[in-house]
């Protein structure tokens, strides 16, 4: 699938490129798997903060649970879901993604 098609599925988030993120996270899969949830959250927050500083509103606010329909307000829910899918799929599978991000389940 083309990047433009993925961007179309992410709607309002023009700076969110899930295909590229997946590729990069897969390169660091072992390091991500060895990281604690707090370390993954820190990494995710740095990415989110940087993207939002460059173009406010153009990147999902994972830390605000924007990707979930019924957040339980757990630490893992604040982490970029693609990081979780690659590093800790058991946490990724616990989340109920909103319709806007449901494509990540099959991604």
Image (cartoon, rainbow, N blue to C red):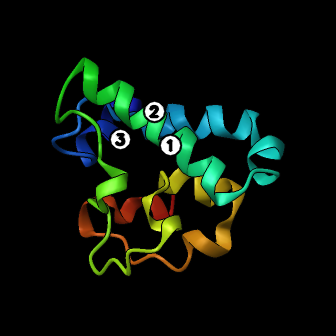
Q: Which residue is at 27% across, 48% downward? A: 9
Residue 6 image label: 3
Asked if residue 85 shows in the view, the reply is: yes
Considering the numbered disc 3 on the image, is that residue within a helix, a strand or a loop? helix
Q: Sequence-wise, which precedes: disc 3 or disc 1? A: 3
Q: Residue at x 21, y 33 (%)?
A: 58
For label 2, count other residues whose C-alpha is less than 10 Å away and answer few (under 14), some (14-19) or many (20+).
some
Cα distance between the residues tagged 3 and 1:
20 Å
Q: Is residue 100 left or right of 79 when viewed as pictured?
A: left
Instruction: Tell which tag, 3 or 1, sits nearer the viewer.
Output: 1
Residue 1 shows in this picture:
no
Q: Is residue 101 above or below residue 3?
A: below
Q: Quadrant of residue 63?
A: bottom left
Residue nearest the viewer, comparing 18 with 46: 46
**Does 34 sit above or below residue 6?**
below
Residue lying farthest to the top in this orientation: 54
Label 2 close to label 1 by CB (< 8 Å):
yes
Mark 3 or mark 2: name the one nearer the start of the chain.
3
**Residue pointed to by mark 1:** 44
From the viewer's perspective, is residue 72 above or below residue 62? below
Q: Position of residue 41 (x, y in %)?
A: 54, 50
Label 2 sits on residue? 47
Measured as percent of width and height from the top left, residue 33 is found at 78, 53
Q: Quadrant of the N terminus?
A: top left
Task: From the viewer's side, name the closer residue of 9 and 70.
Answer: 70
């Amino acid at each position: 699938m083309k990047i433009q098609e993925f961007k179309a599925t992410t709607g309002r988030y023009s700076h969110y490129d899930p295909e590229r993120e997946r590729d990069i996270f897969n390169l660091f899969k072992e390091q991500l798997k060895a990281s604690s949830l707090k370390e993954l959250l820190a990494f995710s927050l740095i990415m989110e903060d940087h993207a939002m500083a460059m173009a406010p509103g153009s990147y999902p606010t994972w830390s605000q649970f924007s990707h979930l329909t019924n957040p339980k307000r757990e630490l893992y829910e604040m982490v970029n879901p693609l990081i979780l899918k690659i590093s800790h799929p058991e946490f990724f599978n616990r989340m109920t993604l909103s319709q806007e991000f449901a494509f990540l389940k099959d991604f």
